[in-house]
Image (spheres, rainbow, N blue to C red):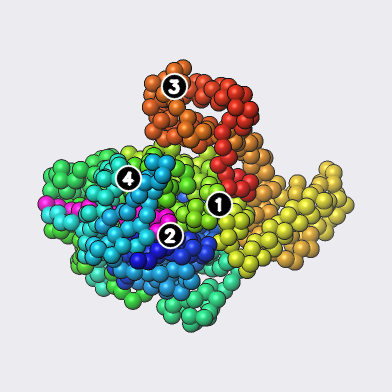
Amino acid sequence: MLTYDVIVIGAGHAGSEAALAAARLGCRTLALTIDLDRIALMPCNCSIGGPAKGHLVREIDALGGQMALTTDATYTHIRMLNTGKGPAVRALRAQADKKLYRLEMRRTLEAQPNLDLAQALVEELLIERTPSGRTRIAGVRTASGQEFLGRTVIVTTGTFLRGLIHIGETSFPAGRADEPPATVLSDSLLRAGFELGRLKTGTTARMDKRTIDFSRVQVQHSDPEPLAFSFMSLGRDLKSRPNGRDSAFRIPHSAFRSLLPCWLTYTNERTHEIIRANLARSAMYGGRIKGIGPRYCPSIEDKIVRFPDKARHQVFLEQEGWDTDSIYVQGMSTSMPEEVQRAFLATIPGLEEAEMLRPGYAIEYDFAPPTQLWPSLQTKLVEGLFFAGQINGTSGYEEAAAQGLMAGINAAMKVQGRPPCLVSRSSGYVGVLIDDLVTKGVLDPYRLLTSRAEHRLLLRHDNADLRLTPVGREVGLVDDERWAAFVRKRDWVDRELARLGDTYVKPSDRETLDELGIDSLPRPASLEELLRRPEMSYEAIARASGNGHLDPDAALQVELAVKYRGYIERQLVQVERQRRLENRGVPENMDFCAIKALSCEARDKLSRVRPLTLGQASRIPGVTPADIGILAVHLEHRARISGNLSGGRSVMCSKTVE
């Protein structure tokens, strides 16, 4: 019987990152998936990134994950979004060649030492009791009866747990289109004592590109300058990347082609009339779906019902790859019958004569409410068992990949006897995502938004490496090449900021002032002071002061650090104030019900979530500031009695995580 350090169930975006992270950290790892040909499949849209989601991809890369590199190798379209807004909400969004993305990710998994791949349907978790009476994971059993023993197991089942597809009045079991569901594994989770719920998501119809009238839609091209998600891709010529498996980027041959456009069109009142007239035939509004759908990525039926005053909704036509005529109709997710889908799509400009290749559908599936997890993503009920991805109630490839990476890291940490790696809310969107899940839980499929981060000016997409690469290095996922590139950038930024503060321009320096477009100076001013002016750019300052080195990525850090210094310092003060609560640990065995001064709701919520710190406790819905004050007093009293002034245990694996 084979024994592994880490077993990963599923090989989607969460499973791929989890398996790679564990194997790269030296653990003998097994990834089990129903179909090896669908590793890292993009079953819904072909997009990676966007506000908050793009931040996550950058953070995955900074920590040593894979999604950014694979996206850079296979994207067909890329743009920087929100360029007219502040730096906190700017983010990359790309469209990838769906086929090439999964092939490149599979090739990466197959080439990874310490990692085995196998095609199997897992039906049962093997759980044993420890001498102390606690339960811990021992391995998994597949549908064929084969058992694999594992010291840790990561469940990344996506939408497969008792998955049920709905197209109008028609329903049938499936994990995704043309794939069987995992029906028995849910029973194993229930027997182990886990609470399960039902959620719903969906996808849109696919249209034949050859039948679309592109004269009636607006074209959108990629940004003209080279863009990339990975910090290892920045500064390299993405248009002339070498071919072959041994190249630095390991690029598939199709990545050399010109980038593809996408197109914008709109629904109209006729579209809305057809949808309203057929709402009863929608699986959602017809009452056939019991699961709760996504709030922030609603179906077209939901949009029409929830926003009746809107005369039209955006529809993006996105190409799913270089070698396919399949067009993804972004913004038109639906569970309507196929003939109704054909009817309302034919009302949209450009799609009047377009042929449908595949109808959209809704899918309903089991999830495990994530308050059953510790912040490491290990379950509270079974030691060594981790959950990541849509089983935790999230939506989106990026959220899944981020959870998979952290679950893979922490499973490896557990095997190696190292403390878990926990990213704080002030250090990354990864931390915001996981803290929201395990502290607040979910009522509908969770989507990460920039508005969920209280310190989002500190969590910009452009500085993810400065925030998290030291964490990835300490964990062991950041190799020497990436670390050397990071250190060069960090040191250059520090030196340049010091130079700007120490270099002064005098009122008599007429040549420099003319080059900067400044009429006069009342007194000598540092280059930093001049750069703070709204109309001044770092590029102009560097050129006028004779600094020939102008690395765009590092230069951006310098400019933002100077121009937003006051706002950044204000947020850092807020972070330090909150950190005092985060540093106050709460014992794992705390009996909240015994603290009678707490409200009944607080006792119940605290007992369910079992927060690790006062900071986490303060974010639990229903726990008031008064409850936190009472809990703090109780911890201080407990600490005095025990002589432990910290009041609890340390939960951060390293200072760099903060």
Residue that label 4 marks? 368
- Closer to the chain start, of discs 4 and 2, is 2
**Quadrant of res 548:** bottom right
Mark 2 residue type: Val
SS at circle 3: helix
Provide residue 282's location: percent of width, then percent of height: 16, 48
Outermost residue to the bottom: 244
Residue that label 2 marks? 6
Q: Is residue 550 magenta?
A: no
Provide residue 81's location: percent of width, then percent of height: 48, 55
Residue that label 1 marks? 418
- Closer to the chain start, of discs 3 and 2, is 2
Distance from disc 3 to disc 4, alpha carbons, whole Å, reads 28 Å
Q: Which residues are magenta?
A: 150-169
| Circle 1 crowding by C-alpha within 10 Å: few under 14, some 14–19, many from 20 | few
Residue that label 3 marks? 594
Outermost residue to the right: 508
Relative to 355, 462 lies left or right = right
